[in-house]
Image: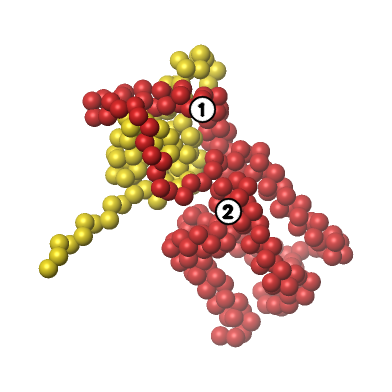
């Protein structure tokens, strides 16, 4: 398919790398678009979780430790150690606290706004269904393209839920952290994408 | 002939994102949570199960499924309705 009108591949790669590293430095959390989107699918549960966490946000460290000790005593009784001395911090790469829903709503809004802005800067919005001539030639055009896109979107949603992440979460972030599951997931979905593209183009 | 090395201890795969795990390091008395769940039966951890399903995990949810927030009330001077 034609890539005319897109950024050069190296500029896109540099931008994605900068966003991935910048997101980690700012938020200390993995960046995964479907993970962000999933929070709004589970909106009611997310709001309930934020409500419960509000009490923890009000507590200082001493109050939190005291509550945890009380909960430990209730759950484990005599099995718990009586020592209240601090332990050394576990040697695990830590992520930061989960951003609030409002922050992730801004993030999703930014994705849409960024796409619209990019399109407007390149000559305005196109009208009608479909994704252009190249897409119509390889897949289909017109209103049939809408049905294909909806079906494809549903399959992507199903796949990312099954794989625990998408091309941003696994491909950008997981691979950058050399997480084995992410390496396998990325190789699988990009391998499948290359195979299907070649098949549709008649190269296989 | 040398002894076979001990099998690597399996730990929860969500340690780096779990917001409660580092709090169990605040006091030695809390280590039992890590031993029992994070480095033990993490498959039975309520937080792990929710995370696997991609559902939100409240920071106040304890591994045994109970809530920590009510335990904080005496220290915060609040009643249950305010939480």
The yellow chain is B
Q: Determine which of the numbered discs, if any, sits on residue B1 in the image.
A: none
Decide: is B47 above or below A114.
above
Answer yes or no: do the residues labelled 2 and 1 have beta carbons within 8 Å?
A: no
Q: Nearer the viewer, mark 2 or mark 1?
A: 1
User: Residue farthest to the right?
Assistant: A123
Relative to the observer, which residue lies in front, A145 or A30?
A: A30
User: Residue at left 34%, top 49%?
Assistant: B11
Mark positioned earlier in the residue sequence (2 or 1):
2
* A154 vs A190, nearest the viewer: A190
Specify the farthest residue to the bottom. Answer: A203
Does residue A159 lie above or below A85 as drawn? below
**Mark 2 → mark 1, Cα distance in angstroms:** 26 Å
Measured as percent of width and height from the top left, residue B79 is found at 50, 14
Front-most of A184 and A59?
Answer: A59
Q: Residue A68 at what x, y percent from top left? A: 39, 27
* Residue annotated with mark 1: A56
The N terminus of chain B lies in which quarter of the figure? bottom left
| Secondary structure state at the residue bearing disc 1 | helix
Q: Secondary structure at mark 2?
A: loop
Question: Is residue A16 at all visible to an observer of this figure?
Answer: yes
Rendered colour, chain A: red
- What residue do we see at 55% from left, 37% from top? A46
Q: Seen in the image, is A195 located left or right of residue A129?
A: left
Residue at numbered disc 2? A32
- Could you tell me which chain the residue with mark 1 belongs to? A
């Amino acid at each position: 398919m034609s890539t005319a009108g897109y950024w050069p591949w190296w500029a896109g790669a540099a931008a994605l790398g900068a966003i991935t590293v910048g997101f980690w430095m700012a938020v200390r959390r993995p960046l995964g678009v479907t993970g962000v989107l999933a929070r709004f699918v589970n909106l009611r549960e997310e709001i309930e979780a934020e409500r419960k966490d509000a009490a923890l946000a009000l507590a200082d460290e001493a109050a939190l430790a005291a509550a945890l000790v009380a909960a430990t005593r209730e759950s484990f009784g005599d099995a718990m150690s009586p020592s209240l001395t601090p332990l050394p911090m576990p040697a695990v790469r830590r992520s930061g606290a989960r951003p609030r829903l409002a922050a992730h709503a801004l993030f999703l809004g930014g994705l849409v706004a960024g796409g619209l802005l990019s399109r407007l800067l390149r000559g305005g919005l196109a009208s009608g269904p479909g994704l252009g001539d190249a897409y119509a030639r390889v897949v289909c055009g017109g209103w049939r393209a809408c049905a294909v896109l909806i079906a494809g979107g549903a399959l992507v949603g199903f796949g990312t839920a099954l794989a625990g992440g998408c091309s941003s979460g696994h491909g950008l972030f997981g691979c950058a952290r050399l997480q084995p599951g992410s390496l396998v997931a990325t190789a699988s979905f990009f391998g499948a994408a290359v195979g299907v593209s070649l098949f549709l183009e008649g190269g296989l | 002939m040398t002894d076979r090395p001990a099998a690597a201890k399996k730990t929860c795969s969500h340690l780096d994102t779990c917001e409660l795990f580092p709090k169990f390091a605040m006091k030695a008395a809390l280590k039992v949570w890590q031993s029992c769940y994070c480095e033990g039966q993490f498959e039975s951890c309520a937080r792990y199960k929710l995370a696997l399903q991609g559902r939100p995990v409240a920071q106040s949810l304890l591994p045994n499924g109970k809530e920590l927030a009510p335990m904080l009330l005496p220290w915060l001077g609040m009643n249950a309705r305010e939480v």
